[in-house]
């Protein structure tokens, strides 16, 4: 090899690349990971090849061999090592006869030209496939899209085939040819799905043909079961499709309600059939796991207010309700359903729901309310008698 070739020292490229871009001087780029392909040759650097058989050096006009430098000659890349000798492979390609340059691994042919693309190499007697970037280094520890398919390479640069393999927190299912499986996969027990990038769906939704599917952390599709995501419960049929459409669901003695999107109501009100209902989240601090059930036959605090739901689950409003059998367990629930607190005028009579006593109705007592004492009978109604706070308690009847 002789004549005009382009040679670029690595040190010059590092120190002056930015300057050359600024002043507009064009230079041939080195094969680095930032390049898609090496550039075309620019103005020739003077020098000649000097070969002793297959061992070649590139000499400057003073006859001194260039070292640790890349040479671009007739559209092919060559590398000159510490001793000035052109890197090349003698014999078959093996994993052991790559050339390490700047912590990356390259392969050169017997003629010294840098090799790119697919290469079958020998590794302890086994034939293994490797792939070399257009800019030279072999691909390792990554998934790479090559000629319309995804392939995965281990940390030694070998293509993975006929197995599952995880890299960068993604799991791939590789065929015997090394191509990553795309789409649905059934292992005999469970269904899985691999996206267009070959990665297995995990903790992820899939929308397909108007239906929704969900895949758990190990990649299995949920079928004939339910999950809780973002505080909502979702139910799936035997095919794995999310069950959608507004509906009630009975689970033993408990009830749930699902919206049109398939999500259960969670910490959420429902107005249905002229009545209000309330549904817990999956977990309630006071009740433990409530599994999105409907509140029923219980007093519930919601956003700082108390409501009562009867046996059917309907919220009480505009009525009295006795919690338990004790006479002092009466409360009144107003038009909004929230428990009433303080004075209440009902059917021409005054009652007092004590906020200091969980809004229980006062009866058979003479409590101080504000600056006066008020007397209430056994029904809880105010007798009409009150006494200024400074006058003392009234005499007994």
Image (cartoon, helix red, strand yellow):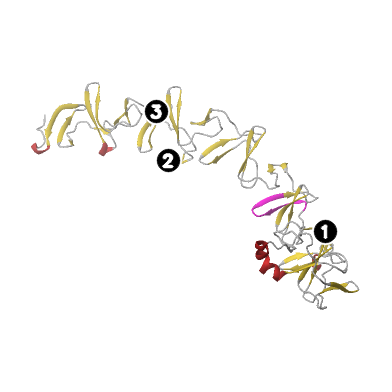
* Membership of 369 in magenta stretch: no
Q: How crowded is mark 1: few (under 14 residues within 10 Å), some or many (20 or more)?
A: some
Distance from Cα at disc 2 to Cα at disc 3: 19 Å
Measured as percent of width and height from the top left, residue 393 is found at 11, 36
Distance from Cα at disc 1 to Cα at disc 2: 64 Å
Name the front one of labels 1 and 2.
Answer: 1
Residue 370 vs 142, above or below: the answer is: above
Q: Residue 315 carries which label?
A: 3
Boundaries of the magenta span = 161-172
Measured as percent of width and height from the top left, residue 221 is found at 65, 41
Position of 162 with respect to 342 (left or right) is right
Q: Which mark is residue 287?
A: 2
Name the front one of labels 1 and 3.
Answer: 1
Residue shown at the point (22%, 31%) measured from the top left: 363
Q: Reading the chain from its start, which is encountered first: label 1 or label 2? A: 1
Distance from Cα at disc 1 to Cα at disc 3: 73 Å
In front: 140, or 260?
Answer: 140
Q: Residue 119 carries which label?
A: 1
- Residue 313 visible (yes or no): no
* Total residue callouts: 3
């Amino acid at each position: 090899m002789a004549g005009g070739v382009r040679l670029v020292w690595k040190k010059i490229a590092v120190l002056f690349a930015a300057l050359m871009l600024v002043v507009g001087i064009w230079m041939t780029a080195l094969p680095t990971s930032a390049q898609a392909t090496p550039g075309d040759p620019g103005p020739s650097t003077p020098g000649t090849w000097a070969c002793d058989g297959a061992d070649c050096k590139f000499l400057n006009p003073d006859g001194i061999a260039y070292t640790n430098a890349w040479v671009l000659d007739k559209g092919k890349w060559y590398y000159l090592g510490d001793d000035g000798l052109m890197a090349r492979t003698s014999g078959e390609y093996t994993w052991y006869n790559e050339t390490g340059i700047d912590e990356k691994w390259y392969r050169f042919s017997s003629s010294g030209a840098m090799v790119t693309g697919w290469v079958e190499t020998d590794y302890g007697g086994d034939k293994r496939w490797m792939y070399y970037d257009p800019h030279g280094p072999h691909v390792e520890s990554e998934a790479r899209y090559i000629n319309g398919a995804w392939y995965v390479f281990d940390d030694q640069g070998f293509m993975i085939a006929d197995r599952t393999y995880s890299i960068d927190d993604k799991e791939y299912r590789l065929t015997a040819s090394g191509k990553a499986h795309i789409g649905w996969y059934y292992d005999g027990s469970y269904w899985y799905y691999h996206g267009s990038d070959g990665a297995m769906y995990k903790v992820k939704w899939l929308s397909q043909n108007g239906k929704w599917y969900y895949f758990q952390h190990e990649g299995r599709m949920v079928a004939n079961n339910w999950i809780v995501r973002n505080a909502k419960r979702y139910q799936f049929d035997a095919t794995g499709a999310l069950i959608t459409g507004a509906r009630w669901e009975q689970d033993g003695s408990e009830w749930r309600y699902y919206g049109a999107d398939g999500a259960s109501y969670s910490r959420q009100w429902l107005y249905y059939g002229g009545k209000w209902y309330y549904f817990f989240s999956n977990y309630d601090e006071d009740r433990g796991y409530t599994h999105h059930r409907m509140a029923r036959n219980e007093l519930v605090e919601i956003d700082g207010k108390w409501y009562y739901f009867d046996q059917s689950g309907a919220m009480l409003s505009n009525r009295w309700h006795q919690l338990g059998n004790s006479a002092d367990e009466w409360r009144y629930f107003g038009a909004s359903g929230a428990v009433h607190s303080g004075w209440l005028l009902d059917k021409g009579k005054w009652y007092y729901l004590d906020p200091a006593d969980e809004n229980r109705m006062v009866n058979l007592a003479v409590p101080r309310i504000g600056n006066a004492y008020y007397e209430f009978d056994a029904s809880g109604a105010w007798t009409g008698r009150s006494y200024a706070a400074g006058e003392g308690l009234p005499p007994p009847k």
